[in-house]
Amino acid sequence: MTAPSVGRVVHYVSYGTPGGEYTSQCRAAIVTDAEPLGADAEPDQVFASLCVLNPTGMFFNTHVLQDEDGHVGGTWHWPERDE
């Protein structure tokens, strides 16, 4: 996995709502801090702090786990490339 660096654009996956009114969506995010592995992290886990850009505003989130496969809510991944 490529480590994130400050200023890179990634996708943050929103949680959606429990009742399903809003589904989980990919949102643009800017890496604000590339976090080193913590003592409790697995060797393949990568975390970053993000500024998430939503249609209605921004929010900041720290210690966000990378998830390239499942795109689970509350995680980030590299943007897919169109081919």
Image: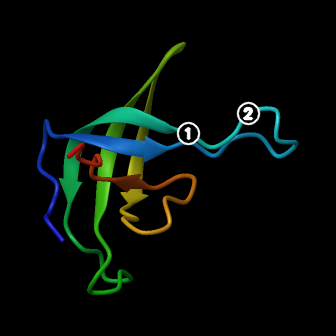
Question: Residue at (13%, 65%) from the top-left corner?
Answer: 2
Relative placement, left or right, of 27 versus 48 is right
Circles 1, 2 touching at the beta carbon (< 8 Å): yes
Q: Which residue is mark 1?
A: 25
Q: Quadrant of residue 32?
A: top left
The N terminus, quarter of image: bottom left
Residue 58 % position (x, y): 44, 21
Q: Residue at 55% of width from left, 39% of height from top? A: 25
Indicate the position of residue 24 as horizontal and vertical percent values: 62, 43
**Looking at the image, is 25 positioned above or below residue 62?**
above
Q: Tag 1: residue type?
A: Gln
Q: Is residue 10 above or below residue 38?
A: above
Assess disc 2: are there few (<14), some (14-19) or many (≥20) residues with their C-alpha within 10 Å of its C-alpha: few
Disc 1 is placed on an element classified as loop
The residue tagged 2 is: 22
Q: Is residue 65 left or right of residue 37?
A: right
Q: Residue furthest bottom?
A: 43
Cα gap from disc 1 to disc 2, whole angstroms: 9 Å
